[in-house]
Image (tube, rainbow, N blue to C red):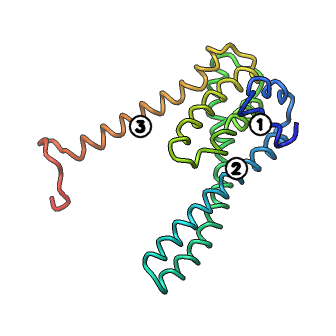
Amino acid sequence: MDFYEKVKGFILEPSKTFDATKEDTLEDALKYYVGITAIFSAISAVLFAFASTLFGSMMGGFEMMMGASAGIAGAISIFVMLLILMVIWAFIGGAIIHIFVYIVGGRKGIVKTIIALMYADTPYLLFGWIPIIGLIVAIWSLVLSVLGIRQFQELTTGRAILAIFIPIIIIGIIVFVAMIAVFTFAIGPSGEMISQGS
């Protein structure tokens, strides 16, 4: 399948498209992922440049020129940084998820997990930058992660759901406990907020 067919397929017919890409290599998936991540990074960079220029124009004169130049330089930096970080995270996140895939019985290898998750990110990378819609497509990408893991690892839907949601729940608990710890420390033993002067 070519790039456009994959994009269309993962959005409109994900189950069928996962079946059609089941034999894809990591190289195939990485080329696709870099392409679709480049789109996301470019849109994010353009939005940053626009915001910087708009802020500069509100300040007027010299600040507008500085805002425009900073916007362009910042946009290029954001594009490169996002592209690199998201590709790196695809492998790190895939490795973390694969631990739980293996726990629930997935035995098709870590590469299959990483490929499935790369493809599952399609809706979010295309539309995640749009307010409100971004939340909807993030959920849709999560659903696609379950479908991809189910089909690439040949698991039941229930096991695929566990593989995706167990790490999310664990991370959620860790964040919650950390927030409670910070809040408790901020209040202090006397039950009053600790001031900076104390």
Q: Does the CB distance between marks 2 and 1 fall below 8 Å?
A: no
Task: Give neighbour class at mark 3: few <14, some 14-19, many 20+ (Cα, 10 Å).
Answer: few
Task: Give neighbour class at mark 2: few <14, some 14-19, many 20+ (Cα, 10 Å).
Answer: many
Q: Quadrant of the N terminus?
A: top right
The reply, left or right, for residue 158 in relation to residue 62 is right
User: Mark 2 or 1 closer to N-term?
Assistant: 1
**x 48%, y 86%: residue:** 61
- The amino acid on which the numbered mark 2 sits, given as a three-letter code, is Thr
What mark, if any, has residue 37 been given in the picture? 2
Label 1 vs label 3: CA separation?
35 Å
Residue 104 at x, y percent in the picture? 63, 17
**x 58%, y 67%: residue:** 49
**x 65%, y 15%: residue:** 157
User: Mark 1 or 3 closer to N-term?
Assistant: 1
Q: Is residue 81 above or below residue 11?
A: below
Secondary element type, mark 3: helix
Residue underneath mark 1: 8
Residue underneath mark 3: 175
